[in-house]
Amino acid sequence: DGGITQSPKYLFRKEGQNVTLSCEQNLNHDAMYWYRQDPGQGLRLIYYSQIVNDFQKGDIAEGYSVSREKKESFPLTVTSAQKNPTAFYLCASARGREQYFGPGTRLTVT
Amino acid sequence: GQNIDQPTEMTATEGAIVQINCTYQTSGFNGLFWYQQHAGEAPTFLSYNVLDGLEEKGRFSSFLSRSKGYSYLLLKELQMKDSASYLCAVRRNNAGNMLTFGGGTRLMVKP
């Protein structure tokens, strides 16, 4: 089946550690996105990539980094520089107008 | 800058009709999306409007007025499973066709 996978579903880390969230898609989509969602709020764009080996900062990129070495994969690293990393992280991909979302990773940093 | 407003919460009765409004101020408007999101899950696509008017899809309809910066999502014959958050998102053609989301409207359907 075609789709977007994110792993793990739940992730726990200690403060000061970097952590990488996985996002893989087999939809052959060119564009991929990372969003952050805080409780009771909408989605905010962290980074996006429209093509392999290229990515752009979104509205809240500070404390995050990404890579896009393969079309299928767009991993997000939450660094220790991110002041409030605990959140629900959603990855999406698109070809054309509609974005398709993965199931999300809930990150808790203590 | 971008600004998208929608009510935080709404309550409606099973079988009734509810209208969720969204107003926006954004540069480079290139379409408006509505997504449904159940708690702890990913958003799922409901509708897309790029021209003025009403788009109907089963129990759900979405309306857009570009001159007024206004959209609404209309849900008919409400069911308990419609209890979810509804996210309004604007697509910008001057920013790689990125989506900017509103804060979401949490709809509670009561028996």
Image (cartoon, helix red, strand yellow):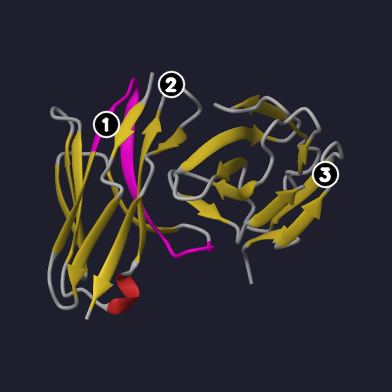
Q: Residue at x 25, y 77 (%)?
A: B79
- Residue under numbered circle 3: A19
Does B36 appear in magenta?
Answer: yes
Q: Which mark is residue B94?
A: 2
Q: Residue at x 54, y 26 (%)?
A: A59
Q: CA distance from mark 1 to mark 2?
A: 16 Å
Is disc 1 placed on a helix, strand or loop?
strand
Quarter of the image that includes the N terminus of chain B: top left
Is disc 3 placed on a helix, strand or loop?
strand
Q: Residue furthest front?
A: A110
Q: Nearer the viewer, residue A13 or B64?
A: A13
- Residue under numbered circle 1: B24
Q: Residue furthest bottom?
A: B111
Image quarter for residue A104? bottom right
Q: Residue at x 78, y 43 (%)?
A: A70
Q: CA distance from mark 2 to mark 3?
A: 32 Å
Magenta range is B23-41
Which is in the foreground here, disc 1 or disc 3?
3
What is the three-letter code of the residue carrying label 2?
Asn
Q: Residues within 10 Å of mark 1 (few under 14, many from 20)?
A: many
